[in-house]
Image (cartoon, rainbow, N blue to C red):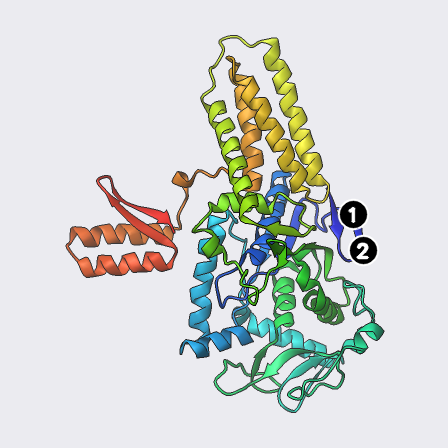
Amino acid sequence: MQIYNTMTRKKEELVPINPGKIGMYVCGPTVYNFFHIGNARPFVVFDTMRRYLEYLGYDVTFVQNFTDIDDKLIRKANEENSTVPEIAERFIKEYYVDADALGVERASCNPRATEHIDEIIALVQKLIDAGHAYAADNGDVYFSVRSYPAYGKLSGQSIESLESGARIDPTEQKRDPLDFALWKGAKPNEPSWDTPWGKGRPGWHIECSAMSMNILGETFDIHAGGQDLIFPHHENEIAQSEASTGKPFAKYWMHNGYINVNNQKMSKSLGNFLLVRDIAKEFDLEAVRMFLLSAHYRNPVNFSRDLVEQASTGLARLKTARERLENAPVAEVATAEDADFIAAVDNYKKSFCEAMDDDLNTADALGVLFEYARAVNTFVSTPSSKEALEKAKELFDSITSIFSILRNKESDTFPEEALALLNERSQARADKNWARADEIREQLKEMGFAVEDSKEGAKLKKI
């Protein structure tokens, strides 16, 4: 497989550090609100990358963090007279509701910044000891950019070019305008932790370095995220990580392009800032997912209702083809046409893999799927051998599983915790403990599940 490496600015063959295994870190959400369609693109794109790598036989460790301490969370907590942990917990649950609806597979782990404070402090101290960072009088700790000569290699910006626009905020005590915060000194009414240089909380960039290296090792295979993260977030991650270890941080860097809305840049001021939660009220999120994969991930994509409706129509065509395949008449004896179709299935599989192997070209790969669906519709118009039908189903299901479309929503699996609560609720209703039954219903709702009572018993449904 060839992938475009932002670091080298060219396509490179994917060669894992450890044969057969892939360590992949994707920057996740800052959990202070519902996520928008721009956030959804990297979630969907790199989930598809993960699924394809697993299809190829790789053992993938997929890490996506939650930023659960940040200026935005603090501001939200103050506005709602709540606490930062309460805000974070609430919107982590809401993230899963929308991500599940988009068909995003749960990560191998979702580390939270506040759960890795010890690792963050240790990394900051290591940088201070090595002369790459310094503590200011107010408890802030800054990374000294000039101590790392390779700074700017990911974004292609030189230190000289960055100097012209660099300024020092009056509230900051850094020595150089280019330096960035690793740790922020404690302020009133903010969460804080004790450190050798005073109480405070982590900066945004340091958390990803500490968590990714702690889970995946000092050098791992793929680091991914949106194009907007190349500078300064990923640039700063590289600097602080490589300055602390003396080793390459990530082998490959992948970044998806921006999303425009009706050919305009998405922004709150233009009123086109679309939350996935709101889009779900109008469209099936499977169609939204397919729309997001209909363009190459590195290209910008324009979100419009017309385009999502086109994706909905395409999704219906695929569903019809799969249903016709399921209900196709079976011939008692295989024919030459069956052998020809089996060979054709192998060719479609090859074409699909060639597209995906070319820097995750989901646009071309979807084109192959639609061509395959048309071939299936023709093939099943007459009785066919069981072998040919099974082979056709296998490829259809493999491709749609990689894209995470045509999911059987009736067979959704639910967490054991949710199923246990559902059973407890059924017992509470049997005991006429209506208060406890209502309480459990609310608990399940907070977890993203609705309860449907029927003659057959209570069932869970994803909200």
Q: Is residue 147 visible?
A: no
Q: Which mark is residue 242?
A: none
Q: Where does residue 130 sit, x and y in percent of width and height?
A: 75, 78
Q: Nearer the viewer, residue 312 or 450?
A: 312
Q: Secondary structure at mark 1?
A: strand
Which residue is depicted at the point 69% across and 55% down? 255
Q: Amino acid at mark 2?
A: Thr
* Residue 116 drawn above or below residue 406: below
* Residue 26 drawn above or below residue 199: above
Q: Amino acid at mark 1?
A: Glu
CB atoms at circles 1 and 2 under 8 Å apart?
yes
Q: Where does residue 317 sit, x and y in percent of width and height?
A: 52, 31
Which residue is depicted at the point 68% across and 25% down? 347
Between marks 1 and 2, how big is the CA–CA gap? 9 Å
Q: Nearer the viewer, residue 142 or 446?
A: 446
Instruction: Find disc 1 in the rendering and name its residue.
Output: 12
Could you tell whether 332 is left or right of 12 in the image? left
Q: Is residue 39 visible?
A: yes
Q: Residues within 10 Å of mark 1 (few under 14, many from 20)?
A: some
Q: Residue furthest left?
A: 432
- Give the quadrant of the N terminus: top right
Q: Where does residue 369 sit, x and y in percent of width and height?
A: 60, 32
Q: Nearer the viewer, residue 212 or 455?
A: 455
Q: Nearer the viewer, residue 246 or 45?
A: 45
Q: Where does residue 94 sit, x and y in percent of width and height?
A: 44, 60
Q: Which mark is residue 8?
A: 2
Q: Residues within 10 Å of mark 2 (few under 14, many from 20)?
A: few
Image quarter of residue 27: bottom right
Q: Residue furthest right?
A: 160
Which residue is depicted at the point 56% across and 83% down? 200
Q: Secondary structure at mark 2?
A: loop
